Amino acid sequence: MARRRRAGTDPSAAPAGRGDGGARLAARDVAVGYGGRTVLDGLDVRIPSGVITTIIGPNGCGKSTLLRTLARLLRPDSGSVVLDGADIAGLRTRDVARKLGLLPQAPVAPEGLTVADLVARGRHPHQSWLRQWSSDDADVVERALAMTGVSDLAGRPVDTLSGGQRQRVWISMILAQGTDLLLLDEPTTYLDLAYAVDVLDLVDDLHEAGRTVVMVLHDLNLAARYSDNLVVMRAGRILAQGHPRDVITAELLDEAFGLRAEVIGDPVGDRPLIVPIGRAHTRPGRGGTPDPTMS
């Protein structure tokens, strides 16, 4: 199980950044569409500095599209994205890469590429014709490997690692960029629960070291446990944003996911715990009407 989380940080009390009211990153009235279909519809969202923000919502609601738009991989049809007070569209690609790092969903490394070589690619935004690879870059890579606990894997090909090890290596590459703003698109995808908790514990460690994190997660209970700020989406819009204690309610779960659930206190922390209620739970012997054969 995950270790007990701290009492939580109020996003409104986050350290001031250079964006909108303490936000490192913000979307202002952003609309994005594909092939005539609107995916993000006049969306406004603020990413507070110094906290873990997690984007949740049903499949197809635009979570990954929002993350890619915040990272400037997608250009809005209208509206703007602001990074540290500046319109991200006007920044050089190299400058954006020095400010934020994006881990896409299920990334794949070239066959045979070693862990050390993959992590070293994180230094690309700092290279130029005038500034070639140096001992400083090597030191940054070594620190990134150590911070994610994969130093002993440096000589291994990435494609021979377990899913949890690979995610740690990819996060190490982002750290090698030297950015303190991390965007992670479903970093626990395809991982068993124990590996998912391990990766999220690492994310929490990085946050405790001073980084701002934005991630997309499907598991609502893990999102509530590891986040200080939740952004709840449905059909390209924001339904709610705030601390999990304030956001996660039975009514919200029904509206966002069509999910019938009870929301109780997490027995190992101060976060809400979601208990889904399906038809099976009302059948005799499944927690509904007592089954007389069991007495």
Image (tube, rainbow, N blue to C red):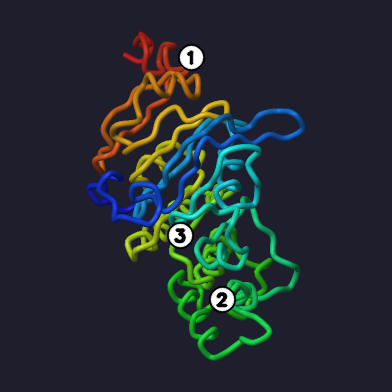
| Lateral position of residue 179 relative to residue 205, left or right | right
Q: Which numbered disc flags the more N-terminal residue, 2 or 1?
A: 2
Q: Mark 2 and mark 3 in contact? Answer it, CB < 8 Å.
A: no
Q: Nearer the viewer, mark 2 or mark 3?
A: 3
Looking at the picture, how far across and down is residue 226, in whole percent?
37, 47
Quarter occupied by residue 209: bottom left
Q: Mark 3 and mark 1 in contact? Answer it, CB < 8 Å.
A: no
Disc 1 secondary structure class: helix
Task: Report which residue position mark 2 lands on.
Answer: 153
Binning the other alpha carbons within 10 Å of mark 2 as few (below 14), some (14 to 19) or many (20 upward) gives some
Task: Report which residue position mark 1 lands on.
Answer: 279
| Lateral position of residue 34 relative to residue 168, left or right | right
The residue lying at 50 percent from left, 75 percent from top is 145
Disc 2 secondary structure class: helix
Q: CA distance from mark 2 to mark 1?
A: 47 Å
Q: Mark 2 and mark 1 in contact? Answer it, CB < 8 Å.
A: no
Task: Report which residue position mark 3 lands on.
Answer: 181
The amino acid type found where label 3 is placed reads Leu
The one nearer the camera, 225 or 25, is 25
The residue lying at 25 percent from left, 48 percent from top is 13
Q: Is residue 40 above or below residue 113?
A: above
Disc 3 secondary structure class: strand
The residue lying at 53 percent from left, 47 percent from top is 81
The one nearer the camera, 75 or 10, is 75
Q: Nearer the viewer, mark 2 or mark 1?
A: 2
Looking at the picture, how far across and down is residue 281, in whole percent?
43, 17
Q: Which numbered disc flags the more N-terminal residue, 2 or 3?
A: 2
Q: CA distance from mark 3 to mark 1?
A: 42 Å
The one nearer the camera, 261 or 57, is 57
